[in-house]
Amino acid sequence: MTTVWISPSATAFSCLCETCMERARQEGLLFSEALMVSSVRGSIAADTDVALARCASGHEITLRRVERPPGLTRPDDRQLQIA
Ligand SMILES: [Zn+2]
């Protein structure tokens, strides 16, 4: 299963299905063709940390949001002030 890491603020993703890439390799497709058949795009809600997506062939892709850096989860107004 493919796992894709999403940046903390991202609401869209674009990735490659590893299963499709592997199959394309075995079928001897050109690399550019393999990229085309494996490409998966979609969107993810900003407050969703883990989600499932499927490629065109139905393989499951796990989307996991990267942990927000500690200290940035609750922005403090004082941090935004520039002296
Ligand atoms: Zn696939």
Image (tube, rainbow, N blue to C red):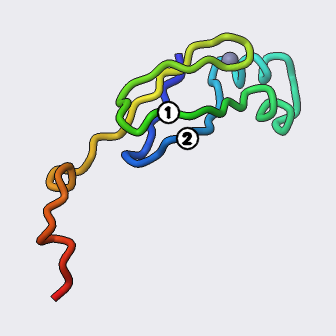
The image position of residue 83, as x and y in percent, is 15, 89
Whichever of labels 1 and 2 marks the residue nearer the N terminus, that label is 2
Left or right of 50, for residue 82: left
| 36 is higher (above) or lower (below) than 57 | below
- For badge 2, the amino acid type reads Ala
List the residue tagged with mark 1: 44
Measuring 53% from the left and 22% from the top, which residue is drawn there? 2
- For badge 1, the amino acid type reads Ile
Judge the density around disc 1: few (<14), some (14-19), many (≥20) Cα neighbours within 10 Å.
Answer: some
Which residue is farthest bottom? 83
Measuring 88% from the left and 33% from the top, which residue is drawn there? 30
List the residue tagged with mark 2: 12
The image position of residue 39, as x and y in percent, is 71, 32
The image position of residue 74, as x and y in percent, is 17, 52
Residue 61 falls in image quadrant: top right
Which residue is farthest top? 58
Residue 78 falls in image quadrant: bottom left
The image position of residue 60, as x and y in percent, is 57, 14
Measuring 14% from the left and 55% from the top, which residue is drawn there? 71
Q: Nearer the viewer, residue 78 or 3?
A: 78
- Disc 1/disc 2 C-alpha distance (Å): 6 Å
Q: Nearer the viewer, residue 55 or 29?
A: 55
Do residues under tags 1 and 2 come within 8 Å of each other at their CB atoms? yes
Residue 67 falls in image quadrant: top left
Label 1: which secondary element: loop
Judge the density around disc 2: few (<14), some (14-19), many (≥20) Cα neighbours within 10 Å.
Answer: few
